[in-house]
Image (cartoon, rainbow, N blue to C red):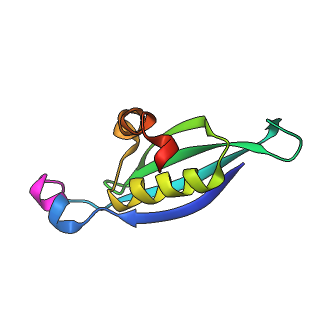
Amino acid sequence: MNVFFGSIFIKKEELKEAKINYPIKLEYYKIINEDEFINKDKFKFGIKIVKTEYKGEKPNIEEKSITYLSNDEGKIEKILNILKNNEVTPICMQEIIYEFSKSLLHI
């Protein structure tokens, strides 16, 4: 199950600097894997990022997920906050998470 965590539009200044003339929205989701029990009452959690580019008649949508990331919901929410605050897109999500992987226990 995907639970909406938050969304942002990439700042106009950043888009202008990159010579992009259309809005880009980023949505962040917490994934709750209800069918995968670790212990009797615990779930595995993941994250999903959806990028929507509003250019032309039909929006272009790109998304990526990491389904199984942690058993700790609080850590997942901290990671989602970091991703959202830094406007992380789907294409670089796995790279960023890999960099976090060494310190995930400390987040």
Left or right position of 80 against 1? left
Left or right position of 28 against 57? right
Residue 63 lies in the magenta-colored region? no
Q: In this view, which residue lies farthest toward the front?
A: 106
Residue 92 visible from this viewpoint: yes
Question: With respect to residue 99, does 47 lie above or below?
Answer: below
Depth check, front residue: 52 or 49: 49
Residue 56: % across, % down: 32, 53
Residue 10: % across, % down: 29, 62
The residue sitting at 76% across, 44% down in the picture is 43
The residue sitting at 21% across, 67% down in the picture is 12
Residue 21: % across, % down: 19, 59
Residue 31: % across, % down: 64, 47
Residue 58 visible from this viewpoint: no
The residue sitting at 55% across, 57% down in the picture is 77
Depth check, front residue: 102 or 98: 102
Left or right position of 43 against 51? right
Q: In this view, which residue lies farthest toward the right?
A: 40
Residue 11 sits in which quadrant? bottom left
The residue sitting at 40% across, 56% down in the picture is 82
Residue 40 sits in which quadrant? top right
Counting every numbered tag in the picture gives 0
Which span is picked out in magenta? 15-20
